[in-house]
Amino acid sequence: MPSRRTFLQTTALTSVAASFSPNTLLTATRPAKDRLGVALVGLGYYSTDLLAPALQKTKNCYLAGIVTGTPEKAEKWKKQYNIPDKNIYSYQTFDQIANNPDIDVVYVVLPPSMHEEYVVRAAKAGKHVWCEKPMAVTAKECQNMIDACAKNKVSLAIGYRLQHEPNTQEWTKGLRDGKIGKILMVSCSAGYYDGRTTHWKQKKEMGGGVMYDMGVYVLQGSRLATGEEPIAVTAQQYTSRPDVYKNGLDETSMAQLIFPSGARAAVQTSYGMNMNFLNVTGSKGTLMMEPYSAYNGQTGIWSNGGKIEHPYEVPWQQTKQMDDDAQSIMTKKPMLAPGEEGLRDIKIVEAIYQAARTGKEVKIV
């Protein structure tokens, strides 16, 4: 008969093993790779025109698979990128990706209302997750995504391409180093005229509305410029096309942010007009970035001397973003823009909608 000690040791080992899911054990024993295989979930414009071409240029990752609900797209991508049949999934077969060692990272490029579901499912499949912005529709969804990735011991990064590019990094560092003194005021705008009427951006139930989409850029601009998180906000929203932007959906949003240091930010975003700039006023000078968030680069000028202009071609930003995030996974270092970064923005977005709806100042906690 087994001894009491043997019984206790066996029981302890069994309990430890039971505390790990099969996907956790798979992740822990996964062999190191020189390049990570990425599966794109959703093959719309951003995946087709930017991410897929960028993945042909990346050094640390490559396009290994796709997830799509359109058989015609699957066939086209299969031929164009030489994707094997076993790495092509539908939304119904998505969970089977857990059994595919070719796929290390799942990049969710879907309408915002679908982000939570597919990030959580990818995490449960034991895959690292990249999620396009906006992270989700509510802060609660964002937190659920963060928790799911933590529970399954996979990383989560949000597709904030600008945080990876050199112009943004240069002006952010310059402000932190005090190049124009104490930050007093920020004005940031990002918008374009969108003539579509049936895209997810014009559908509230899919996470539409300009504040979720282009609005995240101006929130990032004000947060990176001040180096702080806003504590209160007032806001206004309107539409010039009520037949398209209806039921509270915003075509244009404006917000005024208050920061702990006393700095203020005025941000504007729209699907009804073209605008793209960041203007930062400090106690010793100003910074002007225009364009501020373009795909093909940014240009900036310090009032007290110096120009910011690192030229590059599309889709360099997406290439850099994915290479950085893949490197973070392989070296087990923190993501530059983790899930918590997306959560911070969505908390502000929710406060802006509340402020616009009520006409009152809303505290951000």
Image (cartoon, rainbow, N blue to C red):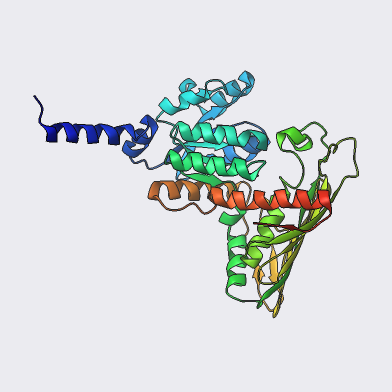
Residue 109 shows up from this direction: no
Instruction: Locate residue 106 relative to residue 263 in the image: left or right.
Output: left
Q: Is residue 25 visible?
A: yes
State the residue in front, 87 or 310: 87
What residue do we see at 57% from left, 68% from top? 173
Residue 227: percent from the left, percent from the top? 61, 66
In the rendered image, the residue lying farthest to the front is 4
Residue 62, above or below 220: above
**Against 278, is 314 above or below?**
above
| Residue 93 point in image, percent of width and height | 52, 21
Q: Quadrant of residue 13?
A: top left
In the image, 14: left or right of 290?
A: left
Residue at (75, 48) in percent of width and height: 211
User: How many circles with numbers are drawn on the protein?
Assistant: 0
Toward the viewer: 133 or 88?
133
State the image coordinates of residue 287 (x, y, percent, origin top left): 70, 70
Q: 349 or 122: which is nearer to us?
A: 349
Q: Answer with left or right where residue 356 lies relative to residue 313.
A: right
The one nearer the camera, 31 or 125, is: 125
- In the picture, the quarter occupied by the N terminus is top left
Query: Residue at the spot x=71%, y=34% of the render?
Result: 206
Q: Position of residue 194 (x, y in %)?
A: 81, 41
